[in-house]
Amino acid sequence: MGFFETFVAWRLLRGVRRQKGFISLSTVISTAGVAVGVMALLVVIGVMTGFDQDLKRKILSVNAHVILTKPGANLADDDSLARELLKIPQVVSASPFIFTQVMFSAPGNISGGVLRGVDLATIKQGGPRGLTVQQGDFADLADASPDDPPRVAIGNEMAKNLNLRVGDYLNIISPLGSLTPMGRMPRMKPFRVTAVFHTGMYEFDSNLVFASIPRVQEFLGLGNRVTGLELQVQDLYAADRVAAALEAKLGPTFLVKDWMRMNRSLFAALKLEKVAMFIILTLIILVAAFGIASTLFMMVMKKTREIAILKSMGATRNSIMQIFIVNGLTIGVIGTSLGLVLGLTLAALLRRYEFIKLPRDVYYISTLPVQIQLMDVFMIIGAALVISFVATLYPSWQAARLDPVEAIRYE
């Protein structure tokens, strides 16, 4: 596309802007339509990406990258197995854990949830990464003497629901009790709340309780056995390959699950929803593209004499077509640029001020997360410009095939 085509296109566009009428209004509407479409796409895709990333971060703040268990049994010699697993490339740590379903009872309140035993090293470092301790000290879980009640850390939502504070006592009931002549009797024991944590995910904050592995083993009568091992790997997105290597090494005796497999349906639904929203919101830009096409059609009708004069002076069909393509693309570029600025501004405001609140028991999170990825921005810009370009082709072709003799016959 040469200087001549670009110069004439800008002259025509500048002339259209000076006019008062339908063409000028339709140009503004077409530009605004592209801008709104790009802005909506950018914000919605940013929210979907932010929701996906925030959910991953919060799930991994409590759960390990890879979990190794023994179906139908507990692990007894976990220390030697952990040392063996640390020899595998990518594995950076292997920690024992206990996981069991229990009931929680406080004066006037009762609820179900999960009791999770963590090793002393994790306790001393302040608990699993990603936890925010709001009250008390997570490290106090390891300081109780054998004669004192075991200590636990509970989520802030559970503390609110059961009306508990640091220093209060919480009865924990396990259905995996002792076998007696009267049948299996549940175990019940009082635990002392020494810390209240916050993960930002309602599911964890309302149902999860941490205690030290020795005290949970004592409560459940497990001896020196644990539920399994939690593995952390160097690259969390390589967890599936590490899990496959572990399955090949250990055989069918052990069950190995990575975080992607355990949450596959959730993240697959989020990805599908993101693609669907991209397609649906792209229709806004498609509607604006019809506005671009109608504007160019009106421009061709309005500038029939000018087109005829250009062709009679030697302008080729290809040059005329390029002139109107430049006109349509200019509308698309201006609309895309405006939508990009508005979308990034709105996304920054949402991320900074968090003025949209969500019900945590429905959406897992309390605020609307926004994360703009460079690849998403490029895809949105590319989609907007391609649609704008396609919208210019037919009107430009109509202008190019205009017969100059017919055009100026009645002038």
Image: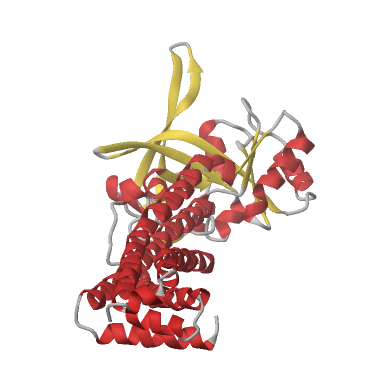
- Of the 4 image quadrants, the one containing the C terminus is bottom left
Residue located at (48% from left, 49% from top): 271
What x and y, as percent, mark residue 262? Answer: 55, 40
- Asked if residue 31 shows in the view, the reply is no
Residue located at (48% from left, 15% from top): 180
What x and y, as percent, mark residue 107? Answer: 26, 40
Query: In the picture shown, does residue 245 fall above or below 128?
Result: above
Residue that lies at the very extreme toward the top in this rendered image: 181
User: What colour scheme governs how the chains and residues are painted in the rendered image of this protein?
Assistant: secondary structure
Residue in front for this viewpoint, 58 or 183: 58
> In which image quadrant can residue 46 be found?
bottom left
- Of the 4 image quadrants, the one containing the N terminus is bottom right
> In which image quadrant can residue 407 be found?
bottom left
What x and y, as percent, mark residue 164? Answer: 31, 49
Residue in front for this viewpoint, 376 or 236: 376
What x and y, as percent, mark residue 365? Answer: 36, 54
Query: In the picture shown, does residue 18 fall above or below 257?
Result: below
- Asked if residue 132 shows in the view, the reply is yes
> In which image quadrant can residue 405 be found?
bottom left
Tag count in the figure? Answer: 0
Query: In the picture shown, does residue 255 fall above or below 210?
Result: above
Residue located at (45% from left, 77% from top): 326
